[in-house]
Image: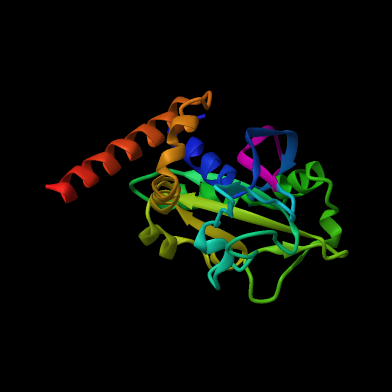
Amino acid sequence: MNFTEELVSWYLRFNGFFPIDNFVLHAIRCQCGKGSFDKHNADSDVIAIRPRSVMEIINGHPLKWAEEFGTERWGIGALEGPWPRNVAILVEVKFRKVFDKDALAAVEKSFCDCRVIPALKRCGLNPAEMALVPGKPFYENKEKDWYFAKCIALDHEDQFSKLSKSIKSECLLLSLAEAEMFLQQRFKLHVEKIGGKLFFNDSFIQYIAWKTKVDVAELNEACED
């Protein structure tokens, strides 16, 4: 697992999801535009589940989730408190400075049916009962108690325009920059709790917590001066 995948995994964790990194989909048979079927092992960078009644409270107040989930951009749930559906999300992280044809092809292949269908089944969902929610970049099951979303995380927002129309209309688009900003803002809002974050058994999130505390301390010193 690389740095960018860790970033997205923690972004989901701090939005109430339970993520699993490098989730193996096992051997799949995939045509993906080729003339013959290709059988190979596949995995997802991150797959995550979020129960709809998730609540997280600090100092007596419920945490707010990332704006993109609760605003018109994605519209999956509320900005704070429980959401109307359980959510399963399949994430692919593509960190490339040069977004060429090979990179675009890799994105398309990441969300072909031969990968999405096994992921749905591993989440306990029936692929035949999933339908795209009108005007939204995610799917809903027949019983209307689950959403399923495909998410592509890219380096910068300006790379979104290079994606195909189908990817842009059927996937959540997340930039790594905004994922990092969300984590930093969360720590800044609860800087008094940062000490607890240093007990996470993960060097990446420990660094983000430490760096945020240093930045806040420096800002306070500058304001006092």
Which residue sits at x=57%, y=54%?
Answer: 61
Looking at this rendering, what residue extends furthest in the right direction? 143
Front one among 152 and 188:
188
Expressed as whole percent of the image width and height from the top left, the position of residue 223 reads 18, 51
Which residue sits at x=56%, y=53%?
Answer: 63
Report whether 7 appears left or right of 109. Answer: left
Expressed as whole percent of the image width and height from the top left, the position of residue 106 reads 52, 46
Expressed as whole percent of the image width and height from the top left, the position of residue 35 reads 67, 48
Front one among 68 and 120:
68
Residues in magenta? 36-49
Front one among 113 and 15:
15
Residue 221 in view, yes or no: yes
Magenta region, main secondary structure = strand
Which residue sits at x=36%, y=32%?
Answer: 210
Which residue sits at x=42%, y=40%?
Answer: 192
Q: Is residue 206 above or below residue 190?
A: above
Q: How many circles with numbers are drawn on the protein?
A: 0
- Was residue 93 drawn as part of the magenta stretch in this picture? no
Q: Quadrant of residue 92?
A: top right
